[in-house]
Image (cartoon, coloured by chain):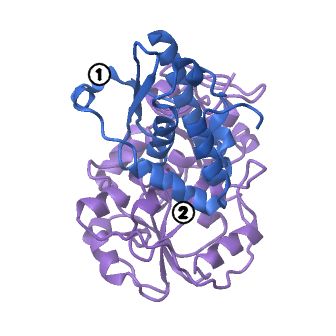
Amino acid sequence: MTAELPGQLEEIRDDFLALTTKERLQLLLEFSTELPELPARYAEHPDLFERVTECQSPVFITVEVGDDHLVQLFAMAPREAPTTRGFASILVQGLSGLDAQTVLDVPDDFPSSIGLTEAVSPLRIRGMTGMLGRIKRQVREKL
Amino acid sequence: MTVEVDSNPRFSDFAHPERLVSGEWLEPRLGTPGLVVVESDEDVLLYETGHIPGAVKIDWHTDLNDPVERDYIDGAAFAALLGSKGITRDTTVVIYGDKNNWWAAYALWVFTLFGHADVRLLDGGRAKWEAEGRPYTTESESAETVDYPVVEREDAPIRAYKDDVLAHLGKPLIDVRSPEEYTGDRTTAPAYPEEGALRAGHIPGAQNVPWGKAVADDGTFKPLADLNAVYREGAGLRDGDDIVAYCRIGERSSHTWFVLTHLLGFEGVRNYDGSWTEWGSAVRVPIAIGTEPGSAR
């Protein structure tokens, strides 16, 4: 990987890559438990979210771009879908607070670069790729 | 069989009631020598969030599929896998999972390719176990490695390849996908990822019986009379039929394979695991679109 990653995303990637395949699953599980609760303004308005159809389990995302061009990302996914929750949580932690252009510059293949392909299978990783693509599209629309 | 069967009257009408166990049977038997509980899920992390105490995990992607070729693992890899999970050739294996046991049924079917004799499903899977308030643990699995013999897969009786299906055209085919996939409106299950098929539709002559028609609201299998209404009266299957079931990658049709073989007692049911992701992209195979089964040209 030669692409420049924003610091917080690079840190996540390096954390994963430093681990064995089995430990990476554990870390993904930790991420899944850390997916933040939705703020009240969204918790009551699931209609404001976009469904990520690339994921096998229902996951919904929405993006805010402030006047300062900083991105906030919100996601919800059921507890019975920890892998999907983990993917969402990585992106929420890795992208929130970044400048919009920085988010748009994140390589589209980021999900394949964090060493999870072997642990969860390429098919499942596609869900995260779909999530990232939709986040970027929403950022573009809201700029 | 090493562990007695579940004589629950809910199962007694089925052709092979010994293939199902209930939560009330399983819970007091956890830890019984000769019994290994296996969890097999769509979500690769679900086991880690909590599983039946003592259960081991087998993942369809990372454990049962060959990592390179689109095929199942071979006899040596299967022996190593099962041995590492504390399963011997004589072990009674009970499999359960998420999503109405889709992947559990798929794992059971793969175990059957290797001729593992005593392999059963926990009726209702994770959802029912949870609904009944039964215990989970997050302790990591600690199976002692045992010897499992290297047995070569015997695909022919229960697995159909594309050429087998071509030769089968005109005989009963059950397409267990959603109506939208069957008619050709879409190539993927609603709300599922694109898994790549260049054409949409179904195999000519296939009846559309979505897998979920075999399942009651609580995730258990429907009673025999209801299953007969769906598969015998509805889809016209008759004893003695050669039947091929397929879906998109063979997991939902494993579920239907289980229903037809073990609950309804059809012999000679094969699962076409290449399913639509192969058929819908293969060159010069006939397909049909729309709501009618159609016939091969």
Q: Position of residue B148 (x, y in %)?
A: 67, 81
Question: Disc 2 residue type?
Answer: Leu
Which mark is drawn over residue A133?
none
> Going 56% across and 20% down the picture, which residue do you hit?
B289
Depicted B5 relative to depicted A56: above or below:
below
Residue B268 visible, this angle:
no
Give the residue number, with chain letter if any, for mark 1: A47
> Of B246 and B133, which appears nearest the observer?
B133
> Going 42% across and 47% down the picture, which residue do you hit?
A81
Depicted A77 relative to depicted A21: above or below:
above
Q: Position of residue B223 (x, y in %)?
A: 29, 56
Shade of chain A as shown in the rendered figure = blue
Question: Disc 1 residue type?
Answer: Asp
> Of B42 and A15, which appears nearest the observer?
A15
Q: Position of residue B265 (x, y in %)?
A: 46, 60
Q: Position of residue B5 (x, y in %)?
A: 39, 79
Residue A58 visible, this angle:
yes
Give the residue number, with chain letter if any, for mark 2: B108
Depicted B228 relative to depicted B24: above or below:
above
> Going 40% across and 84% down the picture, which residue do you hit?
B4
Which quadrant of the figure has residue A18? bottom right
Q: Label 1 marks which chain's residue?
A: A
